[in-house]
Image: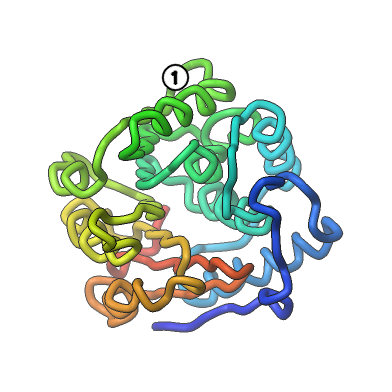
Amino acid sequence: MVRDYQAPDWQQYRMDMHAPHRQLEAPAQEIAVVEAALDALVHTGILPHREYDDARLLAHRAAVAERFDIPWTAITPRMQRFIYAINAIHRPACMVAVGIFCGNTFISNAGAAIGPGACYQAERLIGLEIKPEEAARAARNVASVDPAGQAQILAADGLPFLEAFAGTIDLLYLDADGAGGRGKSVYLDMVTAAEHALRPGAIVLAHNSVNLAGPLAEYLAHVRQGTPFGGSVNVYLDGEGLEVSRFGTGEGN
């Protein structure tokens, strides 16, 4: 099943990438938009329900705003809430995020399991960033909310990592750029490399499904064609977008 959810104002909703913590709308509006997107995932069978703890999300958000060194980010407040909520509801035992830059995208996922926003305990939380200097920044940022060191931040290329991954992945987040001008088209190679490890019912999140739909065309066709994916929703919360896909026919956690 393929569908999309479009917030009525997604084309007007814009963030200054250098001021990611600035409030862009009334809290009630942000919550309503994200809840409608979660409803679309429930309707498609990707999530079992839409319930998550708003107070924990706000605690997570405050800690990131206070402690993280974020030179810039395209993760809007809506997207931060949405990614956090998906993880808080799905509760992946193993979450892998590829292309985490300074760690903001990683913690938007992992913040449901570590730090002040934690609502469950994960087994493995892995973040990959190919640039060593940004991987080091991400590690410092994540350590500021994860003093116990539950998360693992690696300076590594996501493709060979996923090909060789031993174990099961419950949620895979993709936000990497391929070398040689390949850009986001590398998502297709990455999800294919990870499929041997994806648990039935696992969720795959692909950022930039709206503004970079062209380079992502083959990836989007792959996750929307049916087998091996059992449902996919393109979520227009903002101008970047997020494709949310369920692997296999399982119902998840």
Place of residue 231 in the rendered image (x, y in percent of width and height, measured from the top left):
38, 75
Badge 1 amino acid = Gly
Quarter of the image with the N terminus is: bottom left
Front residue of 221/92: it is 221
Where, by quadrant of the figure, is residue 158 drawn? top left
Left or right placement of residue 214 versus residue 16 in this view: left
Instruction: In the displayed orientation, state which residue is furthest to the front.
Output: 180
Left or right placement of residue 50 versus residue 93 in this view: right
Instruction: In the displayed orientation, state which residue is furthest to the top.
Output: 148
Front residue of 40/242: it is 242
Residue 75 seen by the camera? yes
Place of residue 85 in the rendered image (x, y in percent of width and height, measured from the top left):
59, 52
Residue that label 1 marks: 149
Q: Secondary structure at mark 1?
A: loop
Mark 1 is surrounded, within 10 Å at the Cα level, by few (under 14), some (14 to 19) or many (20 or more) other residues, namely: few
Measured along the vertical axis of the image, is residue 211 above or below residue 197?
A: below
Measured along the vertical axis of the image, is residue 199 above or below residue 49?
A: above
Residue at image coords 58%, 24%: 145
Front residue of 56/126: it is 126
Place of residue 248 in the rendered image (x, y in percent of width and height, measured from the top left):
28, 67
Place of residue 223 in the rendered image (x, y in percent of width and height, measured from the top left):
31, 73
Where, by quadrant of the figure, is residue 201 drawn? bottom left
Measured along the vertical axis of the image, is residue 252 above or below residue 135?
A: below
